[in-house]
Amino acid sequence: MISPHRTFLYLCLFVFAPPFALAVDRLSIPLADPPQWKTLAKYQNTITRDEFERLLTGVYCTHGTSEELIRIDLAKACILMDHDAQTWFTLRFARHEPKRKSASRRKKGGVLSGLRIALDPGHIGGEWAKMEERWFKSGDALPVEEGEMTLRVAKMLAPKLRELGARVSFVRDKTEPVTPYRPNDFKETAREILKAGGNENPREEFDGPDDPLKDQTVRWQSEILFYRNSEIRQRARLVNSKLRPDVVLCLHFNAEAWGDERNPTLSDKNHLHLLVNGSYLPAELEFDDERFEMLQRLLSRVSEKEIAMADTVAPVLAKETGLPPYQYTTDNVIKVGTSGYVYARNLMATRLYRCPVVYFEPYVMNSNEVVARVQAGDYEGTRPINGVERPSIYREYVDGVVKGLVEYYRAARR
């Protein structure tokens, strides 16, 4: 779950590197890697001005850009590399759109033969679920825990994809962090962040999840650095350096605000949407690392495949689940594709993974229907859930993803 109402944007000017020293820089968040602008040299003369502008304005910078950051003329684009040094990266445009490789054709075997798919079950779960605020319990019912649920979906999905010929790997395969660090490793960094924000003597602890000032405590900042920053960045390193998949499927469940985790607010809402990378806010583009990562994704041309895949899979998953499209009420997204289910949004995972990424957000975990289906667990066939015969929610999720991928790749690999 990535709540549209709870986007944490760290406006502190720090970069983190073990052994946990801080250095002043124009980076977005602690743990951000300094941009490696030289790596973009391979994209010189690979994109025309028209295509560059189309992707910039239609996918990535839909809220506009400043000429203080990105300047475009007939032959080149200049992108600010370093605010303080005022150095610029110059991208030379191609005169004509270079011939691009056609999509890989299907090999003998299943429809997904030879395709490398990495499954990224969202969050961590287990003993970390409450810290992540991905756990609630309604009355005498079993707890609803997103990290456990996404891992179950991934483990059920993997063999079905392998039967179709895919080579499947896991970004996370247990309810343990991928990062080697833990919250206590970030306490000094947390204190520095709070100090930079004007809190010279922060509290160490907060008074439960409803403490309105918990973000001003060392513990909360340390935990955020652990599970929201270090964990995702370590997953990105694994994806980019070791797994090197053709596509990453980020598996999540969505939710509405539920309040008290032990007396949660249940909802009648239930919906579905998929996310791809894009729709960077002007404030996000001010950071050197996010501007670099945006440009890296734009030039690698992953958006075309991401959007096409998500736009094909979404209606199939919607038909399987019977879920209507979610409608954002915030301005940090833009609807892409034609299905009505797909949005572009700048999330850390979709930004840092250097390959196409499709981010799934089906179901509302704290809806009355989903809570009842989670209590039923996994089972064959159908069972009556609130008076309606329904399959296991996990099998329904898996079947929708598999059918959607088959439909996309049958067309894409002809």
Image (tube, helix red, strand yellow):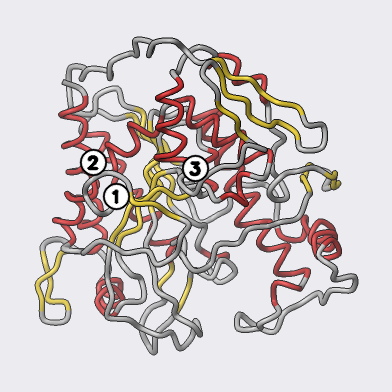
- Residue 350 appears at what percent x and percent y? 48, 43
> For the point 34% across and 13% down, which residue is it?
100
Measuring 54% from the left and 51% from the top, which residue is drawn there?
281
Question: Which residue corresponds to the image point at 12% horizontal and 72% vertical from the top-left?
Answer: 383
Distance between mark 1 and mark 2 Cα atoms = 7 Å
- Assign the C terminus to one quadrant of the image: top left
Q: Nearer the viewer, residue 7 or 209?
A: 7
**Three-letter residue code for mark 3:** Cys
* Residue mark closest to the camera, 1 vs 3: 3
Indicate which disc residue 156 carries. 1
Left or right, residue 46 beside residue 89 = left
Taking depth in this image into account, of 381 and 398 the one nearest to the observer is 398
Instruction: Give the left or right position of residue 116, taking residue 56 as reference.
Output: left
Task: Give the quarter of the image for residue 270.
Answer: bottom left
For disc 2, the marked residue is 160
Instruction: Give the image quarter of residue 403.
Output: top left
Q: Secondary structure at mark 1?
A: helix
Task: Locate the N terminus and report the quarter of the image it occupies.
Answer: bottom left
Which tag is nearer the camera, tag 3 or tag 2? Answer: 3
In this rendering, the answer to whether 308 lies above or below 378 is: above
Q: Earlier in the sequence, mark 3 or mark 2?
A: 3
Measured as percent of width and height from the top left, residue 191 is found at: 84, 63
Q: Is residue 241 left or right of residue 14?
A: left
Q: Position of residue 378 (x, y in %)?
A: 25, 64
Q: Decide: marks 1, 2 in contact (CB < 8 A)?
A: yes
Q: Amino acid at mark 2?
A: Lys
- Residue named by callout 3: 61
Amino acid type assigned to the residue bearing label 1 in the image: Met
